[in-house]
Image (cartoon, rainbow, N blue to C red):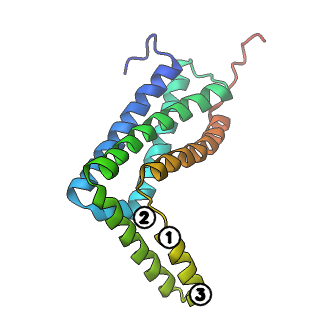
Amino acid sequence: MSESNVTVKESAIQYGLILGGILAISTVLMYALNQELFLSAWVGVGTIVLVIGTGIFSVGKAKDILGGFMSFKEAFTAYFITTAVGLAISTAVGILIFAIIDTELGAYLNEQSYEMARAFMERFNTPEEIMNESLNELKEVDNFSIVNQVKSYFTGLIMQAVIGLLIGLIFKKADPNAID
């Protein structure tokens, strides 16, 4: 990506599109190759690391664009735009797969999630009353519905905003020669 005449926001959008493409491709590959991966904690952790890492990389590039100095607002903006665009693309692909292409997959994954939760609680000797209550609540939720995917997107944005605030504090650097 050429840095000449590129604004911080344009750069962040470009990195967000790259992130979204990577997340979309990984989602399609999981769908095509092994749908059980949608329930893998390791895939979830890897995705979070990828999103945060891409956001940090975007902030670093924004700092380069700005000549090594950036305000907290500029750092936060670069991080947040990158992650918001990337996660929006990923959410759109998820909605496409679970609500349009394969509507039965969401029900299957919800059932598998239910069984995993049951096994987990049994392994830790959760009292029967608490286990039944938790499992009944879990059975009522369709994690892959359009509404819940959109809710998940906005929840993710809130988490990314908090992380972005911390990244903004870390990357901000005032220009000592600036005149206020």
Secondary structure at numbered mark 1? helix
Work out whether 127 lies above or below 105: below
Write down the residue under mark 2. Answer: 41
Q: Is 169 on the left-hand or right-hand side of 116?
A: right
Residue 129 on image: x %, y %? 59, 87
- Identify the amino acid type marked 3: Glu
**Which class describes the residues within 10 Å of circle 1: few (<14), some (14-19), or many (20+)?**
some
- Which residue is tagged 1? 138
The amino acid sitting under disc 1 is Leu
Mark nearer the N terminus (2 vs 1): 2
Mark 2, residues whose alpha carbon is within 10 Å: few (<14), some, or many (≥20)? few
Whole-Å distance between the Cαs marked 2 and 1? Answer: 17 Å
Q: Position of residue 152 (x, y in %)?
A: 51, 50
- Residue under label 3, please give it: 129
Residue found 44% across the figure and 59% down from its top: 143
Q: Secondary structure at mark 3?
A: helix
